[in-house]
Image: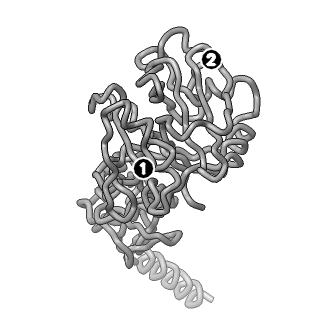
Amino acid sequence: MRNIKSLLILFICMAVVIAGCKKQETPKPKAPTITTADITNNLGISASGGGSVSSDGGSAVTARGICWSTSENPTTADNKTNDSLGTGSFKSQLANLTTNTIYYVRAYATNAAGTAYGKSVSFLTNTIDLDGNLYHTVKIGTQVWMVENLKVTHYQNGDALPNVTDDNEWVTLTEGAFCNYANDPNNGAVYGRIYNMAATTDQRNICPAGWRLPTNTDWNLLQVLLGNGTDVGGMLKEAGTTHWNAPNTGATNSSGFTALPAGNRGYGGFADLGNYTYFWSDPTEQYTRALLYNQSDIAGTSNYSPILGLSIRCIRVQ
C-alpha cells in the first residue's frame, strides 16, 4: 500500500512539473478591423478615398489601401493602392477613372491572418465635356442630374457651335448657336452658356455622351420626387442672394440641384440675369421649366419661340 501511495505522489509531482514546463500557447491572430472612407474630390478621371484600421487583429498590418472596380465588392485583385503599414487612418488616390461611370470602392488591410475589407461604397464619377468643363452630379430619387448648367461649345462629335454675339443675327438663326449672357465669358463660367432651340434639336447632340436633355416627363417626375408641392422651386434654387436677387422666395436648395438665375436672350437682347432661369426640354416637346426669384414653385411653359436663348441642364441616360 505504501508503495502505491509513493507512486501516486510521484506521478502527481511529475504531472505538476510537466504542466509547469509546458509552453503557453500564443493566441492566433485575427484579421484586421477596417472601415472605408467616403469618396471626395471627384474630378471625373480621379478621386480621393481612404480608410481607417482600428485593430491589427494581433498581428502587424503589412499592407493597406483601397481597391476599386466597376463591379460590386472589389478585391486586391482589382485596381488598388498601397498606403503604408500599421493601424490608423490613411488617404488614397483613385486614378485613371472613366467619367460618368459608377465605381465600387473598399478599403483593405492585410496581416498574417489574411486580408480584411471595409464596407463597399459606390460613387458616380463626374463628367467632363469636350471643352474640359467639369460637371458635378446629384441623385434625386431615381434621377441623376448635372449640378451645373451646360457650358459646352461643341456637339458630341466635336463639331463647334458658333458663338453669336449680335442680337439681330441671333433672332434670325436657323442652326444651333450659343452665347454668354451679355456676351461676357465670366457669366458663362458661372451661369453656363445660353443656347437657341436649334442647338437642342440637332442630331449631333448637345449634351455630353451618356447625358441628354430632360423631357417633360422627367421634369414632372422630378417634381413628384420632391413632393409635388408649391415649394419645389425653392428646393431647386441655390439658397441666398449671392446670385439670385432678393427675396429669392423659398430657396433652400434641399435637393442639391443648385439652380442659378442665368437669365435669357430674345428679341430684346439679354434679360433677367439674377431674376429668372429657364431650361430647355427635349425639343420634340418644346416645353420649358422656369424658376423665379420671387416664387417658391416651378413654372412650365410650352411652345417657346425658337429664337429664344435658354439654359440647358442635362439628365443622365439610365
Quadrant location, the C terminus? bottom right
Q: Which one is in front, 240 or 314?
A: 314
Q: In the visual, does 280 lie left or right of 16?
A: right
Camera-near label (2 vs 1) is 1
Question: Mark number for residue 176?
Answer: 1
Local crowd at mark 1 within 10 Å, few (<14), some, or many (≥20)? Answer: many
Q: In the rendered structure, which amino acid carries the disc numbered 1? A: Gly
Q: Position of residue 114 (x, y in %)?
A: 41, 74
Q: Secondary structure at mark 1?
A: loop
Q: Secondary structure at mark 2?
A: loop
Local crowd at mark 2 within 10 Å, few (<14), some, or many (≥20)? Answer: many
Q: Residue 46 lies in what quarter of the image?
A: bottom left
Q: Which one is in front, 268 or 155?
A: 268
> Is residue 256 positioned above or below 136 on the image?
above
Q: Residue at x 55, y 17 (%)?
A: 293
Q: Residue at x 36, y 69 (%)?
A: 110
* Residue 155 appears in view: yes
Residue sticking out furthest to the top = 247
Q: Position of residue 264 (x, y in %)?
A: 47, 28
Q: In the rendered structure, which amino acid carries the disc numbered 2? A: Gly
Q: Which one is in front, 49 or 263?
A: 263
Sequence-first tag of 2 and 1: 1
Q: Residue at x 63, y 89 (%)?
A: 1
Q: Residue at x 59, y 89 (%)?
A: 4
* Residue 101 appears in view: no
Q: How many marks can you see?
A: 2
Residue sticking out furthest to the left = 84
Give the residue at mark 2. Answer: 250
User: Looking at the image, what colour scheme do you see?
Assistant: one colour
